[in-house]
Amino acid sequence: MPSIEDFQRVAIEEAKLALAKGNMPIGCVIVCDGEIVGRAHNTVDSDRSDLGHAEMNALRKVEHLLFGELKGRCEIYCTLEPCLMCYGALANYRIKRLVYSVSDLHAGYSRAAQLPAYYAARKFEVVTGVLKEEVLGLLKSYVAKTGHRAHLLASLI
Ligand SMILES: [Zn+2]
């Protein structure tokens, strides 16, 4: 059975694919019963879409599964803490565990002072800090290479 780190390495591979297309390097994988059922990366800049977050792209790929037999049975492994939009989508699909590497003080969902009752009732297990230094290095290399979003670096812990 693959470990948390094994799945997180696949999410990092996805983040590198995002970077290769000129996007901020963020990736994720969706896992059910120990198997990867979906993987995706951030495409905000390459698709010119603010909906192109890695989590949204991954959910769209497997929503036919998540809406049906796999609802409530999947985990997601993300390189960066999800934003509020993605957190809402994960809650709607009743993800049972969220794993991420780096916390985002700028846009991360956990900075919300209070979640509406609907979302608070759908809280899931959260594991943070997995392979954090590797992901931070990737994000720093994106800023160094593109000069974009440098202000975010101070928000990533
Ligand atoms: Zn998001």
Image (tube, helix red, strand yellow):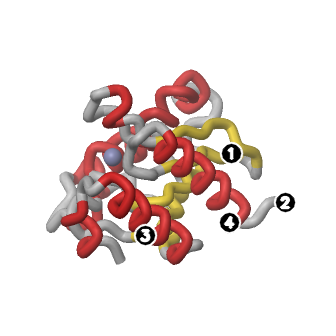
Q: CA distance from mark 3 to mark 4?
A: 15 Å
From the viewer's perspective, is the residue at label 4 or at label 1 nearer?
Answer: 4
Q: Residue at x 56, y 22 (%)?
A: 64
The image's mark for residue 102 is: 3
Who comes first in sequence, dot 3 or dot 2?
A: 2
Measured from the top left, where is residue 6 in percent x and y?
Answer: 73, 62
From the viewer's perspective, is the residue at label 3 or at label 1 nearer?
Answer: 3
Q: Amino acid at mark 3?
A: Val
Please rate how many residues cluster around mark 1, counting C-alpha atoms within 10 Å: few if below 14, some from 14 to 19, many from 20. some
Q: Amino acid at mark 2?
A: Met
Whether pointer 3 and pointer 4 mark residues with C-beta atoms closer than 8 Å, the reply is no
Who comes first in sequence, dot 1 or dot 2?
A: 2
The image's mark for residue 4 is: 4
Q: Residue at x 27, y 43 (%)?
A: 85
- Quadrant assignment for the C terminus: bottom left
The image's mark for residue 1 is: 2
Q: Is mark 3 within 8 Å of ligand 1?
A: no
Asked which secondary structure carries label 3, the reply is strand
Say whether residue 93 is left or right of residue 120: right
Q: CA distance from mark 4 to mark 1?
A: 13 Å
Is residue 74 in view from this perspective?
no
Q: Amino acid at mark 4?
A: Ile
Q: Which residue is mark 1?
A: 32
Who comes first in sequence, dot 3 or dot 4?
A: 4
Please rate how many residues cluster around mark 3, counting C-alpha atoms within 10 Å: few if below 14, some from 14 to 19, many from 20. many
Please rate how many residues cluster around mark 2, counting C-alpha atoms within 10 Å: few if below 14, some from 14 to 19, many from 20. few
Q: CA distance from mark 3 to mark 2?
A: 24 Å
Whether pointer 1 and pointer 2 mark residues with C-beta atoms closer than 8 Å, the reply is no
From the viewer's perspective, is the residue at label 3 or at label 2 nearer?
Answer: 3
Q: CA distance from mark 2 to mark 4?
A: 10 Å
Whether pointer 3 and pointer 2 mark residues with C-beta atoms closer than 8 Å, the reply is no
